[in-house]
Image: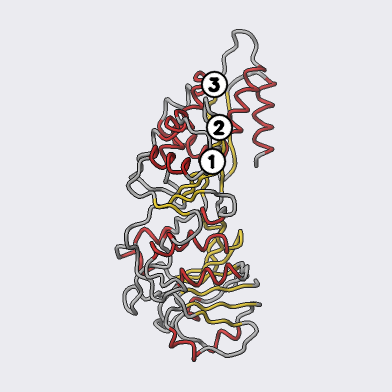
């Protein structure tokens, strides 16, 4: 591994010198800790800033993180004002993480507190495997904490993978391109003319100030180019605002209370001429459920008989929806078109299974049409 990042690092530990990284970044808002870190080191750098502000420094240096450490950020003692696993921070850090990276943490403290949901690591990443003593790339979490004894089990080490899946389709009528992206909006800032975020009036307090005297997370994000606060705005108002800003490619993160069922209909009724592409970014896997479900239903509407078995079972329908969330909507649409061409006159067809099976696409039918069976096999082979 090449680059290591420790957020809310605390003071320096002499054992860090044994770590095998080309670059090691330690971030903590307590400037007094600087004196504990080695000076003029080629591999070790201490950044005395709030984690959110420090990420800007890392971005400016084009840092890519292979190993991330988050242990004891001072939430329960030590003055930490927000968890490092907060969506706004993980989303902002996301572009700096390599596609696969190691995560060293201790999830136990979250599991019995109001931060319990954070232990699920639900921010557009998935666990590839948990590492243990003796495994390649394993680092003992105890190295990064002074609050443990050798008698107790402490911490976890995971090999993680960024999800970053995309579902792409066109709306009816006005043909606006819609993208549902399970990933971070900050990965695409160079593409976007309009970045819609839900920003509270204050946000969380930041422990150190930037050049613009930024005191809160809300002020931090509001200061970024093309960012617009869409809190308490309807989708129609947001579209109108984007049009007034001559935005062609616009991106949003979740801003309402899961009330997205009418978004596609509103997009199709949109009369503006500027907006060409709308992207919905989400970190949590169940966000924008209404948009995904609307798109899944529209695919069904193209060939309702093909999906008759699927919609009769809640389990099958949810499996189909999961597949759509993984970005297979365009494939299913194309497959339906090819099946229609392959069907003989008066021949009936329906899917028996459409789902992800052990992370692989599984599409089956009881049809005896050999051409269609070949199409199904080809679709699975090309996408697995």
How many angstroms separate mark 1 from mark 2 (CA)?
Answer: 9 Å
Residue found 45% across the figure and 59% down from its top: 121
Query: x%, y% of residue 223?
Result: 45, 62
Identify the residue at horizontal 51%, vertical 18% (top origin): 305
Circle 3 packing at 10 Å, graded few (<14), some (14-19), many (20+), is: some
Which residue corresponds to the image point at 58% horizontal and 25% vertical from the top-left?
365
Of the numbered discs 2 and 3, the one sitting upstream in the chain is 2
Residue sitting nearer the eye, 69 or 174: 174
N-terminal of the two: label 1 or label 2? 2
Q: Are marks 3 and 1 in contact (CB under 8 Å)?
A: no
Residue that carries the numbered disc 2 in the rendered image: 170
Res. 110 image quadrant: bottom left
Q: Dots 1 and 2: beta carbons under 8 Å?
A: no
Please identify the quadrant where the C terminus is shown: top right
Q: CA distance from mark 2 to mark 3?
A: 25 Å
Left or right of 256, for residue 164: right
Q: CA distance from mark 3 to mark 1?
A: 28 Å
Relative side of 20 to 286, left or right = right
Q: Name the residue carrying label 1.
A: 179
Residue at coordinates 57% horizontally, 81% vertically from top-left?
45
Q: Nearer the viewer, mark 3 or mark 1?
A: 1
Vertically, is 216 above or below 193? Answer: below
């Amino acid at each position: 591994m090449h680059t290591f990042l420790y957020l809310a690092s605390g003071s320096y530990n002499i054992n860090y010198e044994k770590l095998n990284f080309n670059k090691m970044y330690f971030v903590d808002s307590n400037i007094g800790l600087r004196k504990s870190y080695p000076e003029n080191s080629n591999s070790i750098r201490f950044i005395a800033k709030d984690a959110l502000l420090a990420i800007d420094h890392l971005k400016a240096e084009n840092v890519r993180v292979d190993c991330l450490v988050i242990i004891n950020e001072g939430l329960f003692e030590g003055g930490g004002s927000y968890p490092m696993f907060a969506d706004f921070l993980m989303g902002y850090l996301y572009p700096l993480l390599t596609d696969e990276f190691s995560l060293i943490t201790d999830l136990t403290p979250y599991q019995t507190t109001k931060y319990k949901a954070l232990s699920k690591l639900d921010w557009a990443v998935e666990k590839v495997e948990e590492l243990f003593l003796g495994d390649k790339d394993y680092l003992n979490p105890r190295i990064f904490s002074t609050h443990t004894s050798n008698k107790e089990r402490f911490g976890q080490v995971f090999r993680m993978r960024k999800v970053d899946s995309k579902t792409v389709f066109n709306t009816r009528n006005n043909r606006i391109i819609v993208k549902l992206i399970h990933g971070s909006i900050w990965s695409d800032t160079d593409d976007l003319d309009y970045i819609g975020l839900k920003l509270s009036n204050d946000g969380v307090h930041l422990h150190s100030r930037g050049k613009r005297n930024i005191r809160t997370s809300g002020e931090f994000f509001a200061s970024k180019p093309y960012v617009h606060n869409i809190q308490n705005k309807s989708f129609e108002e947001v579209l109108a605002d984007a049009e007034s800003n001559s935005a062609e490619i616009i991106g949003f993160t979740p801003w309402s209370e899961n009330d997205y069922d009418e978004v596609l209909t509103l997009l199709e009724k949109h009369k503006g001429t500027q907006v060409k592409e709308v992207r919905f970014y989400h970190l949590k896997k169940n966000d924008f459920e209404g948009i995904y479900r609307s798109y899944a239903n529209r695919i069904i509407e193209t060939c309702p008989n093909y999906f008759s078995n699927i919609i009769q079972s809640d389990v099958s329908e949810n499996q189909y929806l999961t597949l759509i969330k993984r970005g297979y909507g365009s494939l299913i649409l194309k497959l339906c078109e090819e099946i229609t061409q392959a069907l003989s006159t008066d021949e009936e067809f329906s899917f028996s299974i459409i789902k992800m099976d052990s992370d692989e696409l599984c599409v089956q039918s009881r049809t005896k049409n050999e051409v269609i069976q070949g199409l199904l096999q080809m679709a699975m082979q090309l996408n697995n």
